Image (tube, rainbow, N blue to C red):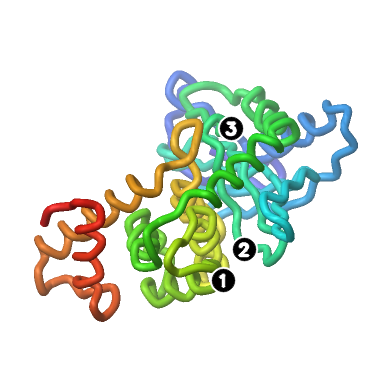
Amino acid sequence: MWTDEEDPRVAGEVSASDDWYNVIQYGDILESVGQAIEGRDEDIEPEGRVEVSPSYHKMTARVGLDQTVEPSPGDPHELDLRIRSGHSGYHGLKVDVGSVRLVCKNGEMAFVADQSYEQTHSEPFQKQFVYHAVDSVVEGVEQVEQRLEDAQERELRNMDEAAIVLHDIGIDRYLENPTSDILTALHEEVEDPDSPSLYETFNAATYALTHLSQDMPQYQLDDGYEAAAQLLEYGEGIPHPDILGENAVESRASELIEAGDDVDEYWDGEREDLRELMDAHGVQA
Protein backbone atom coordinates (compact mmCIF):
# COMPACT_ATOMS: atom_id res chain seq x y z
CA MET A 1 0.00 0.00 0.00
CA TRP A 2 1.57 3.29 -1.13
CA THR A 3 0.90 6.41 0.88
CA ASP A 4 1.90 9.02 -1.70
CA GLU A 5 2.53 8.87 -5.43
CA GLU A 6 5.45 11.34 -5.26
CA ASP A 7 6.99 9.85 -2.10
CA PRO A 8 5.93 6.19 -2.04
CA ARG A 9 6.38 4.32 1.23
CA VAL A 10 4.93 1.04 2.36
CA ALA A 11 2.71 1.69 5.38
CA GLY A 12 1.01 -1.62 5.92
CA GLU A 13 0.40 -5.14 4.69
CA VAL A 14 -3.25 -5.52 3.74
CA SER A 15 -5.30 -7.49 1.27
CA ALA A 16 -4.67 -6.84 -2.41
CA SER A 17 -8.38 -7.36 -3.13
CA ASP A 18 -10.82 -4.44 -2.99
CA ASP A 19 -13.41 -6.93 -1.77
CA TRP A 20 -11.52 -7.07 1.53
CA TYR A 21 -9.61 -3.81 1.85
CA ASN A 22 -9.94 -0.40 0.24
CA VAL A 23 -6.98 1.93 0.57
CA ILE A 24 -8.01 5.39 1.80
CA GLN A 25 -5.18 7.80 1.14
CA TYR A 26 -4.59 10.39 3.84
CA GLY A 27 -4.41 13.15 1.23
CA ASP A 28 -7.83 12.22 -0.16
CA ILE A 29 -9.36 12.57 3.30
CA LEU A 30 -7.89 16.03 3.87
CA GLU A 31 -8.78 17.15 0.36
CA SER A 32 -12.39 16.19 1.06
CA VAL A 33 -12.39 18.40 4.16
CA GLY A 34 -11.28 21.31 1.97
CA GLN A 35 -13.97 20.57 -0.60
CA ALA A 36 -16.64 20.41 2.11
CA ILE A 37 -15.55 23.79 3.48
CA GLU A 38 -15.47 25.37 0.02
CA GLY A 39 -18.95 24.02 -0.67
CA ARG A 40 -20.49 26.08 2.14
CA ASP A 41 -21.67 29.67 1.78
CA GLU A 42 -19.87 30.80 4.94
CA ASP A 43 -16.45 32.44 4.72
CA ILE A 44 -14.47 29.89 6.74
CA GLU A 45 -10.70 30.04 7.16
CA PRO A 46 -9.58 26.61 8.38
CA GLU A 47 -6.44 26.07 10.45
CA GLY A 48 -4.91 23.11 12.22
CA ARG A 49 -2.26 20.45 12.05
CA VAL A 50 -1.63 16.98 10.63
CA GLU A 51 0.61 14.33 12.16
CA VAL A 52 1.64 10.99 10.67
CA SER A 53 3.35 8.23 12.63
CA PRO A 54 6.96 7.43 11.61
CA SER A 55 5.80 4.15 10.07
CA TYR A 56 2.91 5.88 8.24
CA HIS A 57 0.51 3.42 9.86
CA LYS A 58 -1.52 6.19 11.53
CA MET A 59 -2.58 9.72 10.66
CA THR A 60 -4.30 12.24 12.91
CA ALA A 61 -5.42 15.77 12.08
CA ARG A 62 -7.19 18.66 13.75
CA VAL A 63 -8.98 21.19 11.56
CA GLY A 64 -10.41 24.35 13.15
CA LEU A 65 -13.39 25.87 11.32
CA ASP A 66 -13.85 29.35 12.82
CA GLN A 67 -16.65 28.20 15.13
CA THR A 68 -16.55 29.20 18.81
CA VAL A 69 -18.78 28.49 21.83
CA GLU A 70 -18.53 29.91 25.35
CA PRO A 71 -20.29 27.58 27.84
CA SER A 72 -19.19 29.77 30.75
CA PRO A 73 -18.02 33.41 30.77
CA GLY A 74 -14.35 33.74 29.88
CA ASP A 75 -13.95 30.08 28.84
CA PRO A 76 -14.33 29.94 25.04
CA HIS A 77 -13.94 26.73 23.05
CA GLU A 78 -13.16 26.53 19.36
CA LEU A 79 -15.00 23.69 17.61
CA ASP A 80 -13.02 21.59 15.20
CA LEU A 81 -12.77 18.27 13.41
CA ARG A 82 -10.52 15.51 14.67
CA ILE A 83 -9.69 13.05 11.93
CA ARG A 84 -7.98 9.70 12.38
CA SER A 85 -7.10 7.03 9.87
CA GLY A 86 -4.57 4.27 9.51
CA HIS A 87 -3.34 1.23 7.62
CA SER A 88 -2.57 -1.84 9.66
CA GLY A 89 -5.53 -4.06 8.93
CA TYR A 90 -7.32 -2.68 12.01
CA HIS A 91 -7.70 1.08 11.63
CA GLY A 92 -10.43 2.65 9.53
CA LEU A 93 -11.43 6.29 9.17
CA LYS A 94 -13.02 8.23 12.03
CA VAL A 95 -14.08 11.88 12.00
CA ASP A 96 -15.24 13.46 15.26
CA VAL A 97 -16.48 16.86 16.30
CA GLY A 98 -14.21 18.22 19.02
CA SER A 99 -13.03 21.42 20.63
CA VAL A 100 -9.94 23.26 21.74
CA ARG A 101 -10.14 25.24 24.93
CA LEU A 102 -8.79 28.65 23.94
CA VAL A 103 -7.91 29.92 27.42
CA CYS A 104 -4.93 27.60 27.75
CA LYS A 105 -5.13 25.43 24.64
CA ASN A 106 -5.50 22.47 26.98
CA GLY A 107 -7.16 19.78 24.98
CA GLU A 108 -9.40 18.46 22.31
CA MET A 109 -11.98 15.72 22.24
CA ALA A 110 -15.01 14.20 20.63
CA PHE A 111 -17.97 14.98 22.83
CA VAL A 112 -21.12 14.63 20.76
CA ALA A 113 -22.04 11.02 20.08
CA ASP A 114 -24.29 11.77 17.11
CA GLN A 115 -21.57 13.92 15.54
CA SER A 116 -19.08 11.14 14.99
CA TYR A 117 -18.60 9.49 11.62
CA GLU A 118 -16.57 6.42 10.77
CA GLN A 119 -16.07 3.72 8.17
CA THR A 120 -13.89 0.67 7.77
CA HIS A 121 -11.62 -0.22 4.87
CA SER A 122 -14.10 -2.85 3.75
CA GLU A 123 -15.76 -0.21 1.56
CA PRO A 124 -14.45 2.58 -0.69
CA PHE A 125 -13.87 6.03 0.83
CA GLN A 126 -17.23 7.61 1.68
CA LYS A 127 -16.72 11.36 1.25
CA GLN A 128 -20.18 12.13 2.63
CA PHE A 129 -18.95 11.27 6.13
CA VAL A 130 -16.44 14.11 5.94
CA TYR A 131 -19.05 16.48 4.48
CA HIS A 132 -21.50 15.63 7.28
CA ALA A 133 -18.80 16.20 9.89
CA VAL A 134 -18.02 19.68 8.52
CA ASP A 135 -21.74 20.50 8.52
CA SER A 136 -22.00 19.25 12.12
CA VAL A 137 -19.33 21.68 13.30
CA VAL A 138 -20.79 24.68 11.49
CA GLU A 139 -24.43 23.93 12.29
CA GLY A 140 -24.13 22.26 15.69
CA VAL A 141 -22.72 25.12 17.76
CA GLU A 142 -25.81 25.51 19.97
CA GLN A 143 -26.02 21.77 20.66
CA VAL A 144 -22.38 21.60 21.72
CA GLU A 145 -22.67 24.68 23.92
CA GLN A 146 -25.72 23.24 25.68
CA ARG A 147 -23.92 19.98 26.39
CA LEU A 148 -20.98 21.77 27.97
CA GLU A 149 -23.34 23.90 30.06
CA ASP A 150 -25.20 20.80 31.27
CA ALA A 151 -21.91 19.17 32.27
CA GLN A 152 -21.22 22.10 34.61
CA GLU A 153 -24.40 21.29 36.54
CA ARG A 154 -23.57 17.62 37.17
CA GLU A 155 -21.22 16.99 40.07
CA LEU A 156 -19.22 14.11 41.46
CA ARG A 157 -19.12 13.63 45.24
CA ASN A 158 -15.62 14.92 45.88
CA MET A 159 -12.08 15.16 44.52
CA ASP A 160 -11.27 11.58 45.58
CA GLU A 161 -14.10 10.25 43.44
CA ALA A 162 -13.04 12.44 40.52
CA ALA A 163 -9.50 11.02 40.73
CA ILE A 164 -10.81 7.44 40.83
CA VAL A 165 -13.05 8.16 37.83
CA LEU A 166 -10.10 9.50 35.82
CA HIS A 167 -8.11 6.37 36.64
CA ASP A 168 -11.11 4.22 35.74
CA ILE A 169 -11.50 5.69 32.25
CA GLY A 170 -7.78 5.17 31.59
CA ILE A 171 -6.24 8.65 31.74
CA ASP A 172 -3.43 7.23 33.92
CA ARG A 173 -2.11 5.18 30.98
CA TYR A 174 -0.83 8.35 29.32
CA LEU A 175 0.98 9.81 32.35
CA GLU A 176 4.43 9.14 33.77
CA ASN A 177 3.29 9.82 37.35
CA PRO A 178 -0.40 8.91 37.06
CA THR A 179 -1.87 9.71 40.47
CA SER A 180 0.17 12.82 41.23
CA ASP A 181 -0.43 14.15 37.71
CA ILE A 182 -4.17 13.48 37.94
CA LEU A 183 -4.38 15.21 41.33
CA THR A 184 -2.33 18.15 40.02
CA ALA A 185 -4.70 18.51 37.08
CA LEU A 186 -7.78 18.31 39.31
CA HIS A 187 -6.44 21.01 41.63
CA GLU A 188 -5.72 23.13 38.56
CA GLU A 189 -9.25 22.87 37.16
CA VAL A 190 -11.67 22.20 40.04
CA GLU A 191 -12.98 25.23 41.90
CA ASP A 192 -14.70 23.42 44.81
CA PRO A 193 -13.01 20.12 45.85
CA ASP A 194 -16.26 18.99 47.50
CA SER A 195 -18.25 19.17 44.26
CA PRO A 196 -16.17 18.77 41.09
CA SER A 197 -18.41 18.99 38.04
CA LEU A 198 -18.12 16.66 35.05
CA TYR A 199 -17.02 19.70 33.06
CA GLU A 200 -14.18 20.45 35.49
CA THR A 201 -13.20 16.79 35.69
CA PHE A 202 -13.09 16.59 31.92
CA ASN A 203 -10.94 19.73 31.78
CA ALA A 204 -8.61 18.13 34.33
CA ALA A 205 -8.29 15.06 32.09
CA THR A 206 -7.39 17.15 29.04
CA TYR A 207 -5.04 19.32 31.13
CA ALA A 208 -3.18 16.20 32.26
CA LEU A 209 -2.96 14.83 28.74
CA THR A 210 -1.80 18.09 27.21
CA HIS A 211 0.53 19.44 29.88
CA LEU A 212 1.67 16.45 31.94
CA SER A 213 2.08 13.58 29.47
CA GLN A 214 5.69 12.97 28.50
CA ASP A 215 7.05 12.68 24.95
CA MET A 216 3.92 11.08 23.52
CA PRO A 217 2.92 11.63 19.88
CA GLN A 218 -0.40 13.26 19.13
CA TYR A 219 -1.91 10.19 17.51
CA GLN A 220 -1.49 8.32 20.80
CA LEU A 221 -2.81 11.20 22.90
CA ASP A 222 -5.90 11.27 20.70
CA ASP A 223 -6.89 7.94 22.24
CA GLY A 224 -6.60 9.61 25.65
CA TYR A 225 -8.79 12.52 24.57
CA GLU A 226 -11.37 10.03 23.35
CA ALA A 227 -11.27 8.30 26.74
CA ALA A 228 -11.77 11.66 28.45
CA ALA A 229 -14.82 12.28 26.27
CA GLN A 230 -16.68 9.61 28.26
CA LEU A 231 -17.19 12.31 30.90
CA LEU A 232 -19.28 14.36 28.45
CA GLU A 233 -20.83 11.70 26.27
CA TYR A 234 -23.51 9.13 26.93
CA GLY A 235 -25.81 8.35 24.04
CA GLU A 236 -27.27 11.69 23.00
CA GLY A 237 -26.64 13.29 26.39
CA ILE A 238 -24.08 13.29 29.18
CA PRO A 239 -23.55 10.61 31.84
CA HIS A 240 -25.13 10.83 35.29
CA PRO A 241 -22.36 11.54 37.83
CA ASP A 242 -23.82 9.13 40.42
CA ILE A 243 -23.66 6.23 37.97
CA LEU A 244 -20.23 7.24 36.68
CA GLY A 245 -18.87 7.55 40.22
CA GLU A 246 -20.48 4.37 41.50
CA ASN A 247 -19.12 2.29 38.63
CA ALA A 248 -15.60 3.65 39.13
CA VAL A 249 -15.71 3.15 42.91
CA GLU A 250 -17.04 -0.39 42.58
CA SER A 251 -14.39 -1.27 40.00
CA ARG A 252 -11.57 0.15 42.13
CA ALA A 253 -12.87 -1.57 45.28
CA SER A 254 -12.94 -4.93 43.48
CA GLU A 255 -9.40 -4.37 42.22
CA LEU A 256 -8.05 -3.63 45.70
CA ILE A 257 -9.90 -6.55 47.32
CA GLU A 258 -8.89 -9.11 44.70
CA ALA A 259 -5.25 -8.03 44.49
CA GLY A 260 -4.76 -7.34 48.19
CA ASP A 261 -1.27 -6.07 49.00
CA ASP A 262 -0.13 -6.62 45.41
CA VAL A 263 -1.75 -3.31 44.38
CA ASP A 264 -0.57 -0.01 45.82
CA GLU A 265 -2.97 2.69 46.90
CA TYR A 266 -3.27 5.64 44.54
CA TRP A 267 -2.57 7.84 47.57
CA ASP A 268 -2.04 7.32 51.30
CA GLY A 269 -5.38 6.58 52.90
CA GLU A 270 -7.14 5.71 49.63
CA ARG A 271 -8.72 2.57 51.07
CA GLU A 272 -10.40 4.58 53.83
CA ASP A 273 -11.53 7.25 51.38
CA LEU A 274 -12.84 4.49 49.13
CA ARG A 275 -14.87 2.96 51.97
CA GLU A 276 -16.58 6.30 52.54
CA LEU A 277 -17.45 6.52 48.85
CA MET A 278 -18.70 2.93 48.87
CA ASP A 279 -20.98 3.75 51.81
CA ALA A 280 -22.26 6.84 50.03
CA HIS A 281 -23.11 4.80 46.93
CA GLY A 282 -24.33 1.75 48.84
CA VAL A 283 -21.65 -0.42 47.25
CA GLN A 284 -20.94 -3.68 49.09
CA ALA A 285 -17.36 -4.97 49.33
Look at the image and tell me whether residue 28 can be seen: no
- Is the C-beta separation of discs 2 and 1 under 8 Å? yes
| Mark sitting earlier along the chain (2/1) | 2
Q: Mark 2 highlights which residue?
A: 106
CA distance separating discs 3 and 2: 21 Å
Residue closer to the observer: 111 or 189: 189
Q: Which residue is mark 1?
A: 211
Residue at 48% of width from left, 53% of height from top? 198
Q: CA distance from mark 3 to mark 1?
A: 27 Å
Helix, strand or loop at mark 1: helix
Q: Amino acid at mark 3?
A: Gln
Q: Position of residue 185 (x, y in %)?
A: 50, 71
Q: Quadrant of residue 167?
A: bottom left
Quadrant of residue 67 in the image? Answer: top right
Give the residue at mark 3.
115
Crowd rating for badge 1 (residues with CA inside 10 Å; few <14, some 14–19, many 20+): some
Residue 182's place in the image compared with 109, above or below, is below
Please identify the quadrant where the C terminus is shown: bottom left
Q: Residue furthest top?
A: 19
Task: Tell me the kind of residue under disc 2.
Answer: Asn
Query: Can residue 215 be seen in the rendering of this structure?
Result: yes
Classify mark 2: residues with Cα within 10 Å, few (<14), some (14-19) or many (20+): some
x and y percent of residue 105 in the render? 67, 63
